[in-house]
């Protein structure tokens, strides 16, 4: 079967993509971007509107999975294939979201079942259950509640608090915005009006997601770049960066590198991914910024040069980004920690060799796991004489005191700024060389 021809003729392109996203997570253990990359390599063509719709509805499913499955399991008489269950998850979600007339939802679900040999023998079941779900909706029996995956929620309860876990569970399905960092911070009011944006406390602009980023004013001219508010905060903790020489590890796609350059720093970027470096180069070209880019694994980097600052935006479980990447919690992030923690620990050991006396290490990532943040910094200071961590405060304009923990580390959670839609979870700490006589 020619998949492109079939899904286009049956007008189920976006639904097919949703199904592939769900199968990717629950069968292949791949993230949504990884699944999309595989499909594009197979020359399966999707329009931007289909991708946007698929991401929106699959995120809705990931965010309400417990309620969705409770309804489905009470409707099904016995277990069925995961792909069949995923088709029914799509049907139920589209009924609740009122994506199409009832007859169209049933027809598209049946056609979706015909695409795959593993599901084509279940089209009768798909048809029958879809009609039952429609009837349940008419009887006002479909109630969905956002939920976190139970293992992840338990971790948050144990390491933060039950109250914080509940707040994150309530807020994390409401991500329908994206944030922008301006090249020139003096132009905030101009771009606020131009883009119909909201100004967040730190000067980041927030925009509704119902637009195509590349078509917005200022994109092609390099006036701004997309960067979640929480990701932009660590660099803002550093103060005056003009003339500072910076080594930026894991640099691509370049959000923090562009921040540093816009503030007058001289940046050397290191990354090991050709795909990510290509994106970094595209971003820098659009922003009309120049920097040295070194394609290498940081383990292999060798230079006599030392820097004022080494920035480590370390690879991590990315659990802080669940507002945008809700599937991550179902990919067993705790089980991936061992390898990630080794890379993070090794990157700190690497960084200290390239920092000048009185220099800095800025360590950060978008994880909510303490083992990827606080534990590393406390262990590093304990094992490395002559190093200490700076106790951060909210003297920086727009940064709330509640965004710092008891150690003085930046510890942002998805429920912060909840009245304005939340933000990504993020951790950051500043390490300084040469221990002072007394830490205040």
Image (spheres, rainbow, N blue to C red):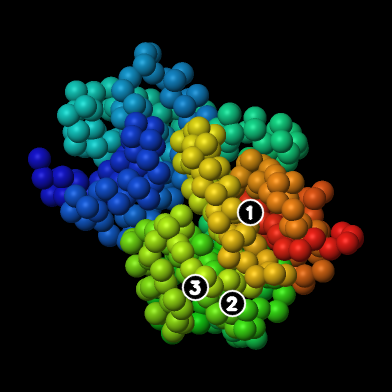
Left or right for 433, reference 215: right
Label 3 environment density (alpha carbons within 10 Å; few <14, some 14–19, many ≥20): some
Residue 26, x across and y down, in percent: 39, 32
Left or right for 170, reference 336: right
Q: Which residue is mark 3?
A: 268
**Residue at coordinates 58% horizontally, 29% vertically from top-left?**
151
Viewer-proximal residue among 167 and 225: 225
How many numbered marks appear? Answer: 3
Q: Quadrant of the C terminus?
A: bottom right
- SS at circle 1: strand
Label 1 environment density (alpha carbons within 10 Å; few <14, some 14–19, many ≥20): many
The disc placed on residue 60 is none
Labels 3 and 2: the sequence-earlier one: 2
Q: CA distance from mark 3 to mark 1?
A: 23 Å
Viewer-proximal residue among 39 and 338: 338
- Residue 157, quarter of the rendered image: top right
Residue 266 seen from this side: yes
The disc placed on residue 245 is 2
Disc 3 + disc 2, Cβ < 8 Å? yes
The disc placed on residue 426 is 1
Q: Quadrant of the N terminus?
A: top left
């Amino acid at each position: 079967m020619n998949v492109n021809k079939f899904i286009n003729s049956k007008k189920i392109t976006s639904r097919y993509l949703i199904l592939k996203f769900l199968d990717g997570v629950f069968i292949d253990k791949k993230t949504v971007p990884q699944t999309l990359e595989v499909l594009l390599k197979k020359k399966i063509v999707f329009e931007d509107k289909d991708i946007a719709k698929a991401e929106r509805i699959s995120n809705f499913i990931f965010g309400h999975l417990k309620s969705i499955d409770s309804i489905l399991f009470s409707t099904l008489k016995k277990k069925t294939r995961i792909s069949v269950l995923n088709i029914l998850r799509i049907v139920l979600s589209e009924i609740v979201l009122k994506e199409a007339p009832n007859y169209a939802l049933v027809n598209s679900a049946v056609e979706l079942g015909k695409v795959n040999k593993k599901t084509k023998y279940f089209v009768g079941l798909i048809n029958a259950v879809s009609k039952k779900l429609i009837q349940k909706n008419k009887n006002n029996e479909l109630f969905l509640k956002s939920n976190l995956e139970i293992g992840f929620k338990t971790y948050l309860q144990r390491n933060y608090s039950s109250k914080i876990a509940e707040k994150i569970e309530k807020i994390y399905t409401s991500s329908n915005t994206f944030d922008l960092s301006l090249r020139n911070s003096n132009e905030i009011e101009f771009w606020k009006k131009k883009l119909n944006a909201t100004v967040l406390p730190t000067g980041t602009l927030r925009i509704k997601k119902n637009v195509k980023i590349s078509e917005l004013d200022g994109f092609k001219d390099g006036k701004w770049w997309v960067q979640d508010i929480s990701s932009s905060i660590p660099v803002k903790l550093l103060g005056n960066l003009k003339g500072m020489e910076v080594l930026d590890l894991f640099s691509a796609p370049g959000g923090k590198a562009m921040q540093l350059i816009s503030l007058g720093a001289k940046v050397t970027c290191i990354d090991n991914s050709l795909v990510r470096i290509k994106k970094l180069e595209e971003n820098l070209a659009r922003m009309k910024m120049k920097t040295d880019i070194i394609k290498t694994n940081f383990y292999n980097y060798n230079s006599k040069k030392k820097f004022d600052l080494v920035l480590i935006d370390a690879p991590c479980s990315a659990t802080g980004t669940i507002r945008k990447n809700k599937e991550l919690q179902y990919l067993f992030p705790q089980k991936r920690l061992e390898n990630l923690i080794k890379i993070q620990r090794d990157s700190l050991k690497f960084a200290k060799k390239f920092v000048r006396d009185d220099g800095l290490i800025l360590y950060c990532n978008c994880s909510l796991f303490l083992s990827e943040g606080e534990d590393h910094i406390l262990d590093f200071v304990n094992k490395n004489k002559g190093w200490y961590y700076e106790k951060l405060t909210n003297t920086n304009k727009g940064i709330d005191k509640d965004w710092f923990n008891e150690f003085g580390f930046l510890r942002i959670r998805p429920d912060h700024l909840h009245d304005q839609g939340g933000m990504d979870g993020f951790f950051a700490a500043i390490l300084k060389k040469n221990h002072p006589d007394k830490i205040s």
